[in-house]
Image (tube, rainbow, N blue to C red):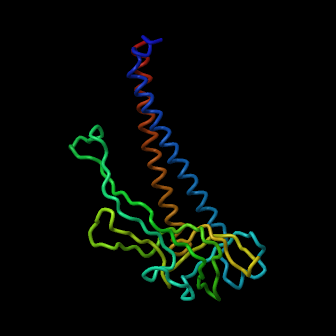
């Protein structure tokens, strides 16, 4: 057994690498299909106005377009709902991962320091809609700014959020236990059409990432098989 492993070690290494790439590609494909499903679900949900929500059964999934109402209280620099991330510096790959040009792959590192998603009101055609939960996701926030003009490690904060008047698209379930409100899944900065377009773009990116990684995976697996047959 030991001699067989030694004989086919290179094939095993290529096979292992190929399997890893194929699994990563499969993960991207899974993300692609999930994003498509979320977009289709949002597209099929009819848009409601505040007046149309009267009489809707609790638990019904609805979609609402509007703007962040002036009735809300701002929490920081005029932002109503927002996240804050602190810059932690640059993280580079090990020397073993140095590319052909002698450069290293480096990425900015940010850590979440604040997540503020309060109960809030949306101004929608014909009235106002209340978002009653505080655990919704913030997507495509229209306001993005940093506390410093240049990145300063452990000091620069980046804020992404919504202020009064920001456009918003919401998908959530109707709740009627304390008046009519929505239990929102997410708050998206834009219209429903903007949301569907962003989902379509994300799905395309995930699809091509899946194709690239799966392609490399199949290539490595093919090399492993050929080498194994050649050494047999």
Horizontal and vertical percent position of residue 75: 49, 80
Relative to 6, say whether 101 is above or below. below
| Residue at 47%, 33% in the rendered image | 19
Horizontal and vertical percent position of residue 218: 45, 34
**Left or right relative to 104: residue 30:** right
Of the 4 image quadrants, the one containing the C terminus is: top left
| Residue at 31%, 45% in the rendered image | 93
| Quarter of the figure with residue 18 | top left
**Left or right relative to 144: residue 97:** left
Relative to 168, say whether 203 is above or below. above
Relative to 133, say whether 230 is above or below. above
**Left or right relative to 188: residue 10:** left
**Left or right relative to 169: residue 49:** right
* Number of marks drawn: 0
| Residue at 45%, 83% in the rendered image | 78
Horizontal and vertical percent position of residue 63: 64, 73
């Amino acid at each position: 057994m030991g001699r067989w492993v030694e004989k086919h070690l290179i094939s095993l290494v290529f096979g292992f690498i190929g399997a890893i790439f194929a699994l990563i590609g499969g993960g991207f494909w899974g993300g692609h299909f999930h994003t498509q499903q979320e977009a289709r679900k949002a597209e099929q949900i009819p848009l409601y106005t505040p007046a149309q929500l009267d009489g809707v059964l609790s638990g019904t999934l609805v979609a609402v377009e509007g703007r962040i109402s002036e009735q809300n209280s701002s929490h920081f620099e005029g932002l109503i709902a927002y996240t804050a991330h602190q810059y932690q510096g640059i993280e580079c790959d090990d020397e073993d991962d140095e590319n052909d040009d002698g450069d290293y792959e480096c990425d900015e590192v940010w850590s979440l320091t604040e997540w503020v998603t309060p109960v809030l009101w949306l101004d929608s055609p014909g009235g106002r809609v209340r978002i009653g939960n505080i655990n919704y996701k913030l997507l495509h926030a229209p306001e993005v700014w940093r506390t410093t003009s240049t990145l300063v490690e452990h000091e620069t904060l980046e804020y992404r959020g919504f202020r009064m008047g920001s456009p918003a698209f919401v998908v959530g379930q109707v709740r009627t236990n304390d008046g009519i409100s929505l239990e929102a899944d997410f708050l998206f900065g834009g219209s429903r059409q903007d949301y569907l377009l962003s989902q379509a773009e994300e799905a395309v990116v995930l699809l091509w990432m899946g194709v690239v990684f799966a392609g490399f995976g199949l290539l490595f697996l093919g090399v492993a098989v050929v080498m194994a047959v050649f050494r047999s």
